[in-house]
Amino acid sequence: MGLMISFFRAYPLQTVLMLVALVLSGAAEGVGLSALLPLLNIALGAEAADMVPGGAAGQSGFEREILEVLERFSIAPTLGNMLLIIIGGILFKSIFLLIAQRQVGYTGARMTRDLRLRMLRAVLRSKWEYFLHQPVGKLTNALATEAQRSSAAFVNGAQAVTYLITALVYGAVAFALDWRASLVAILAGAFVIGISHFLVRITRKAGKRQTRLMTSLMANLTDTLQSVKPLKAMAREHLADQVLAHDTRLLNKAQRRQVLAGAVLDSAQELMFTAFICLGIYVAIERYGMELATVAVLVVGLGRAFTFFGKVQKQYQKLAQGDSAYWALLDSIDEAENAQEAPSGGRQPTFSEALVFDGVVFNYDDLHPVFDGLDLDIAAGTLTTLVGPSGSGKTTIIDLAIGLLRPQAGRLLLDGAPLEDIDLRAWRGMIGYVPQDTTLLHDSVLHNVTLGDPQLGEADAERALRAAGAWGFVEKLAAGVHTIVGERGGKLSGGQRQRIVIARALVNQPRLLILDEATSALDRESEEAVRQTMERLKGQLTILAISHNRALVQAADRVYQLAPGGARLLDAADRSELAK
C-alpha cells in the first residue's frame, strides 16, 4: 500500500474529500440494508402492530434496535416506509459515490499531468551530459506509458478503498445480526483471500517485468523509426523486425502471466466465497436456530461483503500491476533532478567584444581527452569557421560556448567576464542555433519559425525568413507561411528546410548565430544559397560555423583548424590550401 500512501500524501485534500464521500456512501448503503429486515418480516406476514420494541418474541436484538431508532424518529415500520428508507439509502449512496468517483477521476487525470510535467521539467533542466546518455525511447515511455499506468494504479487503488468501505458496511450489518455465524464465514473468507494472495504477487512480478520490457521496446522502436529509410535502402528492415519481435514476445509473455493470474483469482474466489456463505447459512439455521428473515438479511450482508472483499483483492491486483511503473517513473524523475545543471551566475551578458577560450581543458572522461589548453578568440561581428577531422572537438567547442558543458580547467570569457558568472539562460537567449539535422515539425512554416512563441507574429517570421533567404520560395507556397511542411519537413527540399531552420534561429534577433555543420548534407546550389545568406548577415551579428564547405571557409574572417588537444588559427596561405 506504499503506492496509495504516496498518492495520499501528494494530494491530501482530494484524498480527504474522497474518503469522506466514500464513508457517507457506505453509511447510506448500511441504512438501506438495515431496513431490509423489518421489510422481510412484513413480507413474511408479521403484523405491523406487533413490530414494536419488545413486541414479537422472535425478534433479534438487531431488529429491535432498528425499530427503536424508527420509533425515535416517529417512523412507523410499514411496508411503504421501509421501501422509502431503502430507496433513500440507495439514492444518497449513489450521490456520495458519484462525488467520490468524480474526485478519483479528476485526481487521476491531474496526477498524470503532474507526473509528466515533473518528468519533462526535470529532463529539460538536467545537465547536457545526462541527456546524452538517455535513450529517447526511455524518456518517451516514461512520459507516455509509465505516467498513464501510474494514474491507472491510483484509480484502481481508490476503487479498492471504495469496495473495502462497502464490504465493511455489509460485514458490520452481518455481525450485528449474528456475530458468531458471521465470524465463521468471514474467517473462512479471509482464509480464501490469504491463500489467493500469491496471485497478486505473480501480478506484481509480471508488472515489474512489463515495465522493464516496455522501456526496452520503446527505446528500440524509437531508434528503428528514425532509421527506416537506411534500413529499407539496404534491405535490412528484417533485422529491426527481429529485435522488435523478440521484445514484443517477451512483453506478451509477461502480460499473459498477468492475465492468467487475474482469471484464476476471479474463478477461484467466486466458488470458495459461495461455499463459505453456505457454511454461514448452515451454522445460522442449524446451530443457532435463526429466523428465516434474519437469515435472509444475513445472506445478503455476507454475500455482498464477500463480493466486495473479492473486488478489493482484484483491484489491489490491478494496483500491483501498475505499482512498478510509478516507482520506475519516480526513479527517473529523481535521477534527472539529481543531474540538474549547476546554478549559473547572475550577471547579465553582453556581447560587443569577443568570446574567448583561454587555456580550456576538457575531457568527457579519463580515456577520452578532448582539449588540453585550447585558445580561441571569436570576435563580435565576425564569421569564424571551425574545421577539423571528425572527433577533433568541433561540436564540443559549441557546447562549451553555449554553456551546455563546463571545462575542467581554463576559462571562457564573454566580453571579459567569466562565463560561470553569467546568467546562462539570458546568454542562451542571445544565441541562434542551426543543427546539422534540419528537423521540422509537422506544422506550418510560421509555427516552425516561431515555435509557437506568443510574442512572435507573422511580421517577425517574415523578417527572419527574408534574412535567411527563404522568403522567395515561402511566399510562393500554396498557403504562404501557413503551408504545412509535412512530417519532418518532407514537402520541402533539403535547402529549403535548412533555410527555414536558419530563419528559426534568426527570429529572436540573436547576437551569436551558430551553424553546426549546417551545410554538410546540402547540394552545391543549396550550399551557395546558405553562403550568400551568411555573407549578408556577416557584420550584423557574430557567426560561428562548423563547416568543411569551401565557400564558408573563404567567407570567414577567421578559420581555426582543430588538432588533438587544441586549435590553430590559419593564415592566408593555409586557408587558400584548405579551400582548394
Image (cartoon, grey):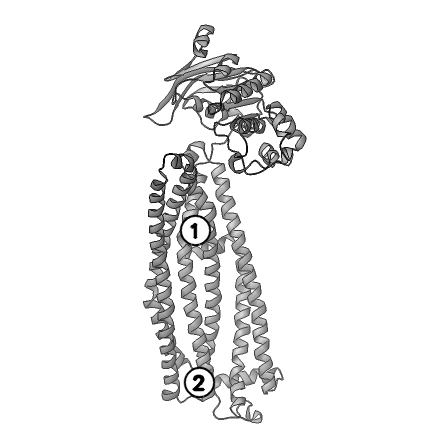
Residue at disc 2, secondary structure: helix
Left or right of 102 in this view: 400: left
Question: Is 81 rendered above or below residue 111?
Answer: below
Is 549 in front, or is 451?
549
Question: Is 571 rendered above or below residue 461?
Answer: above
Residue tagged 2: 295
Picture disc at residue 406: none
Q: Residue at x 54, y 58 (%)?
A: 105
Q: Amino acid at mark 2?
A: Val
Is 295 in front, or is 288?
295
Residue tagged 1: 326
Q: In which image quadrant can residue 127 be found?
A: top left
Q: Position of residue 376 (x, y in %)?
A: 46, 15
Q: Amino acid at mark 1?
A: Tyr
Q: In which image quadrant can residue 475 be found?
A: top right
Q: Rounded to the nearest whole Å, what is the CA distance between mark 1 and mark 2?
A: 45 Å
Question: Is 333 rendered above or below residue 170?
Answer: above
